[in-house]
Image (tube, rainbow, N blue to C red):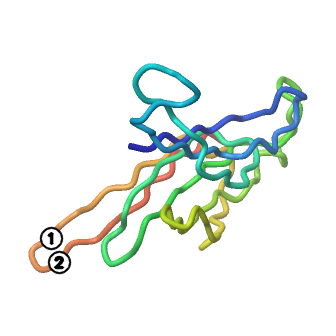
Amino acid sequence: LRLATAQRTTRDGTSRAPVRVYRYDAGGCGGAAGGCFVEEMALPAVGASHVVAGVPRGGGDVVIVANFVEGTPGSELAHQYERDSYVYAVDYAAGSSTLLQSIPTMGARALALFDHCGASSCSTFLAVAIQR
């Protein structure tokens, strides 16, 4: 079991908070009863608003980050919403990631990764909801 968190800003107000991916450790952590989540990797992001993970047809594991805006909350300018969203290939066994593609977006808010099958083939699609 894994958990990925998208955080728009850091505690100091910067919008360059990484997306953090955690792995569930059923053995417990630091004396905690039961299991807990342990950070596995951090992926660069810019004002992340949403994150999805999956395995596209014919490919390996991916994590996709919707980057919403870079700027001071409450006083953003229109051009600050023009942020690429990121598609990362991830290797959970090695704890590594590679940026596969940057997708131009403007105020990306939500993502969906889904399969659609037609009469003769199936394909994986990425849907991106844009707010601006």
Of 126 and 16, the residue lying toward us: 16
Residue most extreme to the left: 119
Q: In which quarter of the image is the N terminus?
A: top left
Image quarter of residue 118: bottom left
> Does 114 sit above or below residue 6?
below
Residue 100, quarter of picture: bottom right
Q: Position of residue 67 (x, y in %)?
A: 67, 48
Give SS at disc 2.
Answer: loop
Q: Which residue appears at 55% of the width and 67% of the height?
A: 94
Residue 118 got which mark?
A: 1
Q: Which amino acid does label 2 sit on?
A: Ser
* Up-down relation of residue 53 to residue 89 (above or below): above
Tell me residue 6's x, y (percent): 62, 39
Label 1 amino acid?
Answer: Gly
What residue is disc 2 on? 121
Q: In this view, does 83 lie to the left or right of 41?
A: right
- Label 2 to label 1: alpha-carbon separation: 5 Å
The x, y position of residue 132, in whole percent, is 66, 42
Residue at 51% x, 45% y is 129
